[in-house]
Image (cartoon, helix red, strand yellow):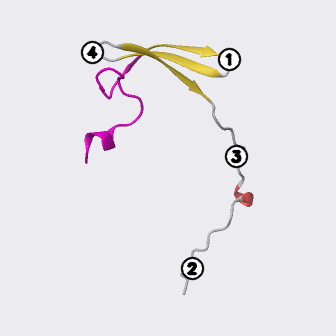
Amino acid sequence: MKKADRTRGIVCSKCGHETLEVKYTRKREAKIMRMRQCPKCKHRFLTLEKVVFDTEPRSIANRPSENLSPTN
């Protein structure tokens, strides 16, 4: 498996380190801003989290039924 395949989430924008520290979190309207710091190179940067798409949860009654019988 390649290193890029194992990477999850946000990596350091300077050195690519995969584990970051969150220094602080601030809520701004419908967004969350976080100051992150790389423990390896000490680079700091801001990330912004916001809702892009909102859906209503579907009830079990509204889900399409799954056909579990084998097809011929």
Q: CA distance from mark 4 to mark 3?
A: 42 Å
Q: How many neighbours does mark 3 have within 10 angstroms: few (below 14), some (14-19), or many (20 or more)?
A: few
Q: Residues within 10 Å of mark 2 (few under 14, many from 20)?
A: few
Kind of element beneath mark 2: loop
Instruction: Give the labeled residue for mark 3.
Output: 57
Q: Residue at x 54, y 17 (%)?
A: 33
Q: Are marks 1 and 4 in contact (CB under 8 Å)?
A: no
Q: Label 2 is placed on what type of residue?
A: Ser
Q: Residue at x 70, y 57 (%)?
A: 60
Label 1 – label 4 distance at C-alpha: 31 Å
Magenta stretch holds residue 54: no
Name the kind of residue labelled 3 in the image: Pro
Residue 41 is labelled as: 4
* Callout 1 touching callout 2 (CB < 8 Å): no
Label placed on residue 69: 2
Q: Residue at x 72, y 44 (%)?
A: 56
From the image, state whether disc 2 or disc 4 is nearer to you: 4
The segment highlighted magenta reads 1-22
